[in-house]
Image: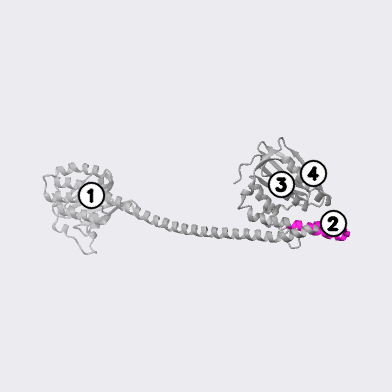
Amino acid sequence: MILIEKQRHSLGKERIYNSQPQQLNALQRLTNLLNQQNTNLQGLLQLIASEVCGAIESAQFCIIWLWDCQAEKLEVTATAGIKPETLSLLKLINPHTGLLDQVFVTGAPQFFQEQTRREDDFVILSCPSVERVFSPSSMYAVAIESLQAGRLGVLAVGNWKNPCAFNDVQQTCLNVVGEVSAIAINNARTIQALEEREQQLARQNEVLLKQNRELETTRQYIQLQNLQLLEATQLKSQFLSTTSHELRTPLNVILGLSQVLLRQRTSTLSKQQEEIVQRILNNGNHLLTTIDDLLYFAKAETDSRSFQVEEFNLTTLVLKTVAEHLFIAEEKHLHLGFHINLNNPLVVNDSVRLKQVLVKLLLNALKFTENGGIEVKVEQVSNDRIAIAVIDTGIGIPESDLENIFEQFWQVDQTTTRKYGGIGIGLAITKSLVEIMQGTISVTSKLGQGSTFQIELPRVVSSIN
């Protein structure tokens, strides 16, 4: 773009080719400004004004105005050969009525000549109390304008005494100066804008680098926390495994001896003794189940490989599981039934874990049901999904507690005097098992009317990682 601008004012230079070498040298110096990365706009304008005064022999002063977009007026930005305080006394450069306004609005050069001039009219007054309007004998103003930059302002030169100053060659030179000045000013502004943009980008880069360092620090902290959490999890697993083993050994002895006492034939126990031994056996089995549940949390999340996918008959699994819990229902005088509606009873999943889920749901229903009964309902939701529901007529769950029912160690009754025992991890384990089997579990319940726990599973599960 700058090369094109240089070509446009080359014709003007040809017209003054044989003119004074002083003008040519100044014009060449101004043209050289195009190739300089000058971002000091004020210094550039002052240099242009000084070069013009030095190049044009008849020019006693030079003034440059640039358009201020915010103030919407021309502002003096550089002068040479004239004091700034004198500018307000020159009627020709009144921004609204004089020569200056005409040049900027039309873009056409204007040449002013005054034929009559008294000797003291060009005396520059220094007394601030004297209000006197000055007019130079001759003044020539050109627009600072180029194709690339547009119209930026006005450049004017003047002579106080000679009304015939500024001949055609000088006017042509000044016209070229106006275009060259526009290009130089536009280049300076462009470079200044680029430098400001570079500085802004540099500041943004510093901010980003600081944020990256903070993110890296946070990442390292999170990584350290994860390592500590992993270590804590491993310690927990090791503790639970060791504790489970230490508890199981004496507990198995207690359970074994209880069973021996109940089965002996040589010497019979009294009815009261038999009830005591049976109570020991039942509570021992309950304690064993609790130990198994605790051990599950130590291994299930980190050892999903223990799940074995196989094809099995879901109807057979449900019937067998229900049959194993009939005696508990009979002891509480509850009805335990089932309803199975499957076109194809074969499914592909982990039969051991699915039975574990059914057992926990059945035991939970039997635990909280005092009257009525429990029903296991199996049906086909779609061609590739099945649903298993355990429906009871138990105490029910308050609606406000339904969203917490599957949380670990959470119970509806959190008091120490609660009627129903347990540590509150059975349903949490159930949810974990169902999710690993790629299923979902939900609950609906009404207080005092019973609950329905329903799981949905794919008929054919994908491989479990």
Quote the CA–CA distance across marks 3 and 2.
Answer: 33 Å
* Residue 266: image location, x then y, percent: 87, 57
**Along the polypeptide, which appears first: circle 1 or circle 2?**
1
Task: State the extent of the magenta-drawn residues as a range.
Answer: 259-287
Is disc 2 in contact with disc 4, using a CB cutoff of under 8 Å?
no
Quote the CA–CA distance across marks 1 and 4.
Answer: 97 Å
In this figure, which residue is indicated by the disc labeled 1?
35
Most extreme residue toward the top is 343
In this figure, which residue is indicated by the disc labeled 3?
355
> Which residue type does callout 2 highlight?
Gln
Q: Which mark is residue 294?
A: none
Quote the CA–CA distance across marks 1 and 2.
Answer: 114 Å
Is disc 1 in contact with disc 2, using a CB cutoff of under 8 Å?
no
In this figure, which residue is indicated by the disc labeled 4?
337
Most extreme residue toward the front is 266
In this figure, which residue is indicated by the disc labeled 2?
264
* Residue 18: image location, x then y, percent: 11, 45
Element class at badge 3: helix
Element class at badge 1: helix
Quadrant in the rendering for residue 415 = bottom right
Majority SS type along the magenta span: helix
In the visual, does 62 lie left or right of 383?
A: left
In the image, residue 357 above or below residue 412: above
**Along the polypeptide, which appears first: circle 3 or circle 1?**
1
- Give the mark toward the camera: 1 or 2: 2
Quote the CA–CA distance across marks 4 and 3.
Answer: 16 Å
